[in-house]
Image (cartoon, rainbow, N blue to C red):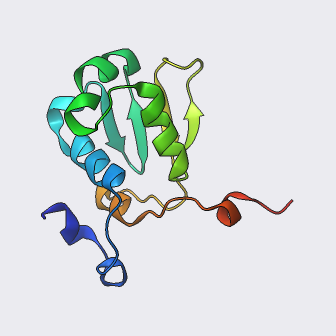
């Protein structure tokens, strides 16, 4: 309930996606900051293998890092740094601001939103 107070009034009647709710909880917990953290509008993953074994299962129904990445992609996050599937990396989203609460208002990508005009 405390996380939902960050929603703008226009989003108050829309349900928050379960993934984004748990992502926000995970990023809000200082005990996780050595593995994953929110840094000025981006998600920074410091240690994907440890995050997979120590953190993901506490917040999600799975503990697979690849499933976590897939969910980030569904919500429009783009990997901006990091080489390899299990290397430290960062993710950004065009709708993200420095406020962690902004994650609760992000909408899942649709086929039309995902297609960019060239």
Q: Would residue 30 appear left or right of 21 to someone viewing this image? A: left
Percent of width and height locating residue 92: 51, 46
Residue at (21% x, 67% y) in the render: 4
Q: Residue at x 57, y 30 (%)?
A: 81
Q: Is residue 4 left or right of residue 76?
A: left
Q: Is residue 77 visible?
A: no
Q: Looking at this view, is 73 or 27 the one in front? A: 73
Displayed quadrant of residue 30: top left
Image location of residue 13, percent across then percent down: 30, 81
User: Which quadrant, please, contains the N terminus?
Assistant: bottom left
Q: Is residue 22 left or right of residue 69?
A: left
| Above or below: residue 107 compared with residue 29 | below
Asked whether 101 or 62 is in front, the reply is 62
Residue occupying the far front of the picture: 61
- Residue drawn at 35 percent across, 49 percent down: 19
Spot occupied by residue 74 in the image (x, y as percentages of width and height) = 53, 49
Point out the image quarter for the C terminus: bottom right
- Say above or below: 9 vs 59: below
Q: Is residue 13 above or below residue 105?
A: below
């Amino acid at each position: 309930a405390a996380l939902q107070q960050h929603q703008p009034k226009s989003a108050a009647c829309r349900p928050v996606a379960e993934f984004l709710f748990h992502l926000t909880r995970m990023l809000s917990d200082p005990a996780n900051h050595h593995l994953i953290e929110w840094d000025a509008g981006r998600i920074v993953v410091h240690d994907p293998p440890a995050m997979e074994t120590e953190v993901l299962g506490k917040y999600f129904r799975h503990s697979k890092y690849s499933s976590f990445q897939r969910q980030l992609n569904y919500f429009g996050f783009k990997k901006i740094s990091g080489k390899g599937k299990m290397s430290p990396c960062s993710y950004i989203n065009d709708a993200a601001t420095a406020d962690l609460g902004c994650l609760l208002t992000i909408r899942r990508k649709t086929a039309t939103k995902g297609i960019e005009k060239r």
